[in-house]
Image (spheres, grey):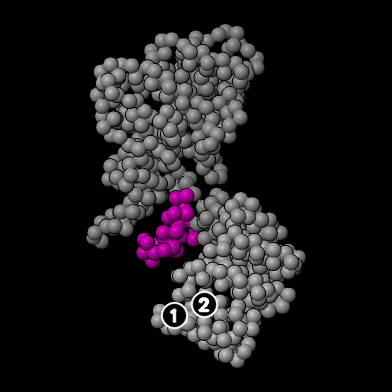
Amino acid sequence: MSHMIPIRIGAIKRAMRVLLATPLLLVATLFGGCQSAPSNDAMEADRPSAAAVAGLRRAFLAGNELPDRLRQLADLELQAMRLAEDEPLRLGALGTAILDICQGSLTGHYALRRFYEHLDSPDAADSHAAWMDAIKAHMAGSADGTPDNPYTSLTPVEAQIFVIAESLSPVGAIYQSTEPESFYMLVVGRPVQGPLKQFHFNLDALYRTTVNSLSDKAAGQAPHFEFTPLTLMGILARSGDATAQAAVGAMLMARNQHDDAIGWLRSASRTGNVIANVMLARIFWEKSLTADTDDDRREALDQVMENYLHAIALGSRDAMYALGSLYLTGAFGEDNEASGVPLLEQAGDLGHSDALHYLAHLYYAGDGVERDTARAGVYFIRSAALSNAAARLGYARYLIREGSDTGGDGRAIQWLKELVEENEDPQAMLLLGNLHARGIAARQSFRTAHRWYRHAARVAPNNADIVNEVAWTLTVSDLARLRKARYALKIMTHMMESDDQARTSPEFLDTWAATFAANGNFDEAVRLQQLALKEATDADREDVLGILKEHLDLFMAGKPVIEPAP
């Protein structure tokens, strides 16, 4: 939930005082629908269209006496939604009453479709299903339900019915706002099988109607009153709207007002709001890290587990991944560590790319599982196929480490090229060079490898890690045609002379010395290598002392470093 409007609690309290006399009207305004009476011609149309629905909605937005009809519709829509699954026989009267108020109501037609299906009246049910299709087509338009291209909805109830009509069960919702006068709703739906899906809805028209209905009255009693989406969220949260409670909790969480956020999010979670459960788990995890006592930490961790388990029960693969990761780190003790991998696998089966990437590393390292490099490769591929950038880089490194015997996925090169096209990723360029140099997942081509290496160094001339790896490869490679000693010396010298921190790194000094040796300047190579040894000794870097001494011996003997690289 990004770019949320900052909370102004004072504004909410002022608005509450101003609007206390008409709280039901306000709630009705938010949950309202069309005001116009049904047209017999429109209702009897064999093929209702999205254009006809658009006309009904324009009439709604331009109509008079809106508040009274909104109050009626609010109660009817909410009743219909609550009764839809368990008491379909009561939907006949409710659906008819809703359509008497708004013939273009998705909720009304859904209620009557359910009613006639229960009565085994397929013709009548099909008629309302056709209206639902037309209304949904209007709501969608050219949108795809993403944050940047949300569907249009007149009411929050209609947004949730839209999700239900897509054969999903709503398991969470939250209001959002990115600008002073924008109002959105995110609804999370659970399919019978597969991962949760997110649907974003634009409620701007409803918000403007609310402002027009209430701002004049509020301004008359409080001249400096400003009605904003936040004002509406705050009042609705206090009136028991779980979607608004989740929104207020999220904004308080973003401001690190965790104790206040917990109260709102707990209220929202009582209705089975998966969004609230995940946020609560994250807050309590932060609390566990800053707890003053062991008891406080254990209590916070209990809440982390409880809320993630609630979210998992509602189908959240993010919660599966988060809790599985915490289990594996030992956050809940050794007894729970074994539960981490199954949760990651469960999240991975639902398409969570980070979970698949994590599993790839676990199986490659044999960390908590029996080492299985073939299985690691499968997980790398599955994650990379889901556009996980880290997994695409990781899979390329896996191929280079395992060699050409793995066969490799034919998409490996294309995945790296896509990273280059998307954001000029120098790591992807470097790995493309390595794969072409070794002829892994691509035809061996030193010319192509050189082109990618130069591209990486050109786009990241001050990235010490990238420059160091390019220079090392082009200096010491056992592939004679791959070596470019003069170019390696040039880029390494430029980087080292411009980076004070790099000049204290034993590894970078080692590479710099190697580039001088490869160009025949062994005196400078020895000087730099002795400096590398001093830096390593001063820093107690016993992990690199041995190899640094080996290279110094070579330089003193007038020999360059040659080894398999990349």
Please name whichever residue, 186 or 269, is drawn nearer the observer in this view of the structure: 186
**In which quadrant of the rendered view does residue 69 lie?**
top left
* Helix, strand or loop at mark 2: helix
Q: Is residue 25 left or right of residue 431?
A: left
Q: Amino acid at mark 2?
A: Leu
Can residue 213 be seen at all in this image of the molecule? yes
Q: Is residue 351 above or below residue 166?
A: below
Q: Separation of disc 1 and disc 2 at Cα?
A: 9 Å
Residue beneath disc 2: 509
Q: Are marks 1 and 2 in contact (CB under 8 Å)?
A: yes
Quadrant, the C terminus: bottom right
Magenta portion: prevailing SS class: helix
Quadrant, the N terminus: top left
Q: Amino acid at mark 1?
A: Glu
Q: Is residue 166 above or below residue 506?
A: above
From the top left corner, tell me how far across and down residue 491 is, in percent.
59, 69
Residue beneath disc 1: 535
Asked if residue 208 lies in the magenta stretch, the reply is no
User: Is the residue marked by circle 2 packed among few (<14), some (14-19), or many (20+) residues within 10 Å?
Assistant: many
Region rendered in magenta? 318-343
Q: Residue at x 61, y 50 (%)?
A: 422
**Mark found first going from the N terminus, 1 or 2:** 2
Please name whichever residue, 299 or 255, is drawn nearer the observer in this view of the structure: 255
